[in-house]
Amino acid sequence: PVLRLGSLTRIENDDVVSFVREYEGRKILVLVNVRSRTVEFNLSEEYRNSSYIDMMTGMDFGFTSNTLSPYEYHILKFR
């Protein structure tokens, strides 16, 4: 329900669709590269330094760079 019902906070990026949804204390960060090339994205320290679980793999996730490959995406649940 978080992705459908949660409040929406957009994160400004030129080539990356990026936003946070929050609902009933749960938060999800979504990043989608909509380009056919590698692009850089911006995240505040708050988001960059948070701990996440990748919702597609169930694995822990942490940012190691500020780039996304062509059409790469992440759906990340805040810990």
Image (cartoon, rainbow, N blue to C red):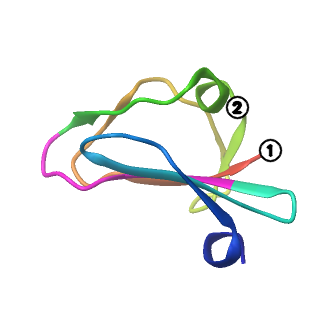
Q: Is residue 74 left or right of residue 54?
A: left
Q: Which region is colored magenta?
A: 28-37
Q: Residue at coordinates 67% horizontally, 64% vertically from top-left?
A: 7
Dots 2 and 1: beta carbons under 8 Å? Answer: yes
Q: Where's residue 57, x and y in %?
A: 59, 58
Q: What secondary structure is marked by label 1?
A: loop
Q: Where's residue 73, x and y in %?
A: 40, 54
Identified by mark 2, the residue type is Ser
Q: In this view of the protein, can residue 30 be seen by the observer?
A: no
Q: Residue at coordinates 69% horizontally, 68% vertically from top-left?
A: 6
Q: Is residue 63 left or right of residue 3?
A: left
Find disc 2 in the rendering and name its residue: 50
Q: Which mark is residue 15?
A: none
Give the answer, above or below, for where 35 lies relative to 21: above
Identified by mark 1, the residue type is Arg
User: Viewer-proximal residue, 63 or 6?
Assistant: 6
Give the answer, above or below, for where 33 lies relative to 56: above
* 68 drawn magenta: no
Residue 41 lies in what quarter of the image? top left
* 31 drawn magenta: yes
Q: What secondary structure is marked by label 2?
A: loop
Total numbered badges shown on the rendered structure: 2
Find disc 1 in the rendering and name its residue: 79
Q: Is residue 24 left or right of residue 37?
A: right
Q: Where's residue 13, x and y in %?
A: 34, 40
